[in-house]
Amino acid sequence: MAELGHPFEGQDPTEPRLVFPRRRLSAQDSLGIRVFIALSCVVLTTLIVYRDRDGYRDGGQGDEISLLDALYYATVSLSTTGYGDITPVSDLARLTNIFVITPLRFVFLIVLVGTTIEVLTAAARERSRIKRWRKHMKERTVVVGFGVKGQAALRSLLAHGVGADEVVVIADDRYGVADATRQGVVGVVGDARSEQVLRDAGVPSATRVIVAADQDDTAIMVTLRVRALAPNATIVAAAREASAADLLRQSGADRVIVHAESAGNLMGLSLLSGNVGEMVEDLMDTGRGLEVVERPISRAELGLAPADVQAEGELVLAVVRDGVVHRFDAQSVRVFQAGDRIVVIRGSHDLGGTGTPGTVAGASAPRSPGTARAQ
């Protein structure tokens, strides 16, 4: 697959621009191939005419056809200019013009006209593609920022069944967007603090938004704008410091991950108990070992107790009923009811089985914290 960084050369990185995953060559590579084909047609025609130069006559000078004369004939012939000063006179030369040079002329013109039409219609086709994309996008997950956190978030979403065509990545780094589109998602180049950039990414109709900005002040501003544009979307934001977590929640984030504090807790836990730390790290590592996921109960599980699910290779951590999370230690849910969802630990090879795509543990849980004590 071709590199995607080149189309953004000379572009203001703060200017919003939608970038779709490319399944074909970039514009530069495509143009280069067409120029190569056109030049090849000219060179091949020149060599053919010069090799059979005795079958051509120069009406203007009458001298023997030189290599320059052959090149001149090739260019005026392939471009259909046809001054008529150099003409084929032998049968072989005329047959060569009919069966070789004429097809080469067609190829040359097709390449020339096709390139011109593509340049003239590229903008219209891009607008049409964006319009179709926005029309058919039923659910949208937007990832703001594509640094280490944003890349890990995208890997987790794709690993848990979210379709690449349902994800949009916003980054002010054109090369970061190029990396994202190589994974099949749509990218937007621009500053996410701009309302226009968020609108171009389809935030107003998004169902889920991940704010993975590098700086806490940027994350707070982006969260405020996202909440204003998408009042019903689930927003998960990352904070470098615990002091910014409350501000992010006040700005509209449903969940806040304090990664500096989380990393410190994991390091302390690993130091005191290496086995426990390894298990927690395993749960956090998408696609390997154990996974924590949320899924709806199946028909076969209706009326069963949480302990019965454990016998099937899953460990139930919590039951979500009517928007309330019931942890396993509360023992407030004895049997499953219709509409229940469960948070389970299971092997990563089981992902995509009975679970709902994208339901990483906690992703669809309600905003209100706490655990019900009675049910």
Image: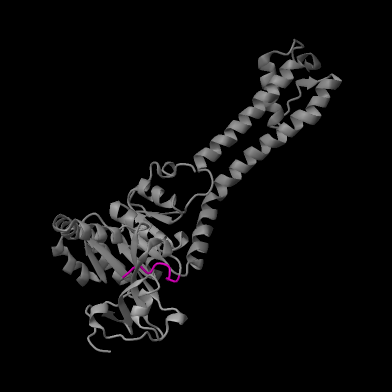
Q: How is the image coloured?
A: one colour
The quarter of the rendered structure image containing the C terminus is bottom left
Name the one closer to the observer, 20 or 83. 20
Name the one closer to the observer, 299 or 122. 299
The spot of residue 32 in percent (x, y) is 54, 35
Q: Is residue 357 magenta?
A: yes
Res 196 seen here = no
Picture residue at 62% right of the left edge, 33% below the top: 37
Q: Is residue 346 magenta?
A: no
Res 243 seen here = yes
Q: Position of 259 compared to 152: left or right? A: left
**Residues shaded magenta:** 354-361
Dividing the picture into quadrants, the one containing residue 40 is top right
Picture residue at 77% right of the left edge, 11% below the top: 62
Name the one closer to the observer, 244 or 134. 244
Dividing the picture into quadrants, the one containing residue 222 is bottom left
Dividing the picture into quadrants, the one containing residue 312 is bottom left
The spot of residue 195 in percent (x, y) is 32, 63
The spot of residue 317 in percent (x, y) is 29, 74
Answer above or below: position of 321 versus 279: below
Secondary structure of the magenta portion, mostly?
A: loop
User: Looking at this rendering, what residue extends furthest in the front direction?
Assistant: 311
Please count the marks in the image: 0
Answer above or below: position of 325 versus 181: below
Q: Position of 362 compared to 123: left or right? A: left
User: Looking at this rendering, what residue extends furthest in the right direction?
Assistant: 91
Name the one closer to the observer, 174 or 75. 174
The spot of residue 130 in percent (x, y) is 49, 59
Q: Position of 310 compared to 73: left or right? A: left
Answer above or below: position of 192 versus 375: above
User: Looking at this rendering, what residue extends furthest in the top direction?
Assistant: 63
